[in-house]
Image (tube, helix red, strand yellow):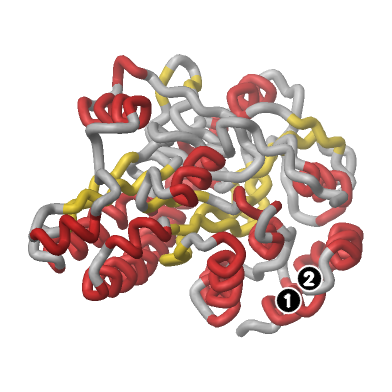
Amino acid sequence: MPFMMDIPRLQSVSYSLCPKKGNTVQKNILIKGEECVRLNVSKMTKGTLVALLCATMLTGCGTNGKNADNAAAGKTTTIKVATVVSANHPMNEALKSTFKPLVEQGSNGALKVEIYDSGVLGGEKELWDSVRNGNIQIVSIGTVMWNEVDKMAVPDFPFLFRDLAHAKKVYTGEIGKELAGDLEKKTGVHFLSWHPNGVRNFSSNKPINTIEDFKGMRLRMPNNPIHLQVGKLLGANVTPLPMGEVFTALEQKVVDGQDNPIAALRTEGWYEVQSNVFESNHMITSLELLASDKMMKGLTEEQRKLVTEAALKTSEESWKLYEKGLAEDKKFLQDNKIKFTTPDDATRLKLVELMQPVYDDLYKKYSWAKELVERIRNVK
């Protein structure tokens, strides 16, 4: 495949607990292709340390694989939910405010939900393997499984979605159900619900008002073939850098700009060394809430229905929280003198046309790609 993703071993937490100017960042967003995962043990909560011990001991924590027997005997069954994003990410906030109480109260205490955030039980690849073999009951990850389920690469297609509302409608609508069904059929893992990950935009220390402004720009991009080609097709001089080096590179003007969700611009402090944001929305990626077949088979029919419905309501909440956070981040950046430029429809169309070489290769690789892309773009 022309765009083989060079996903690092720790699996794509873009700015999870990475220090900037000696401080520990408290907010993150999972973005495929990023590799910075640093845990500050001295600042971990007691629960986080327990989670790490649970992950290494294999026994004594969570369920013991006898969920059905527990249900029949009226015992409590523990459901471990593991994510790679930080505690205050919309995904985890929704799990805490919606999924956990709905499942625990709806089961009258028969099911107990434990949430492990910040990748303490593993990166994306580790969590994907764990949910497949049943060692972890539920996980929230990105599209690390795309090499097994090729349609799960769709969230990385550039300029596929017009905006966040369009992406949400696709992910949570009929097309999202088709993609979920494909994953279930090929892997046996239960697809519970879609959630927002991040809307990528470009920032720079110089104005970006037109496509021509990208020409010659020294642009930092993740070391991911699709991302790198996007930058090159825009006419930029692309430099792949780890997340932890971006602030210094921007400060010392080694690069002029970068691409990430605007939350990163705020939490990483890049707004101090950037002046403009071009709201390209060039990638709107997802998180998937997945359940192990072992767990689902171990629950009663009523409990399976409860978990499934709670996951869908959690999806609704996470999208609301993400949209709210997006607005708050934008206001914060504007208050700190960051200028936002939104491309008009004509510019947007030109950007889509510029990406055609990416799609030509994808269409050659996947027989289903062209039709699916057209259907996604036609969703209103």
Residue 6 shown left or right of residue 361 in the figure: left
Note whether 155 is above or below 216 in the view shown.
below
Note whether 16 is above or below 300 in the view shown.
above
- Give SS at disc 1: helix
Does any portion of residue 64 appear in the rendered image? yes
Residue 236 shown left or right of residue 60 in the figure: right
Residue corresponding to mark 2: 369
In the depicted view, which residue is nearer to us: 189 or 35?
189
Residue 68 shown left or right of residue 188 in the figure: left
Amino acid tagged 1: Leu
Circle number at residue 372: 1
Amino acid tagged 2: Ala
- Give SS at disc 2: helix
Query: Where residue 352 appears, x then y in whole percent?
Result: 81, 66
Crowd band around label 1 with a 10 angstrom C-alpha radius: few (<14), some (14–19), many (20+):
some
Residue ID at (8%, 60%): 74
Query: Where residue 360 appears, x then y in whole percent?
Result: 90, 64
In the depicted view, which residue is nearer to us: 157 or 363?
363
Does any portion of residue 342 appear in the rendered image? no
Residue ID at (61%, 48%): 144
Query: Where residue 194 appears, x then y in whole percent?
Result: 47, 65
Note whether 188 is above or below 169 in the view shown.
above
Residue ID at (42%, 23%): 39
Marks 1 and 2 close (CB-CB < 8 Å): yes
Residue 82 quadrant: top left
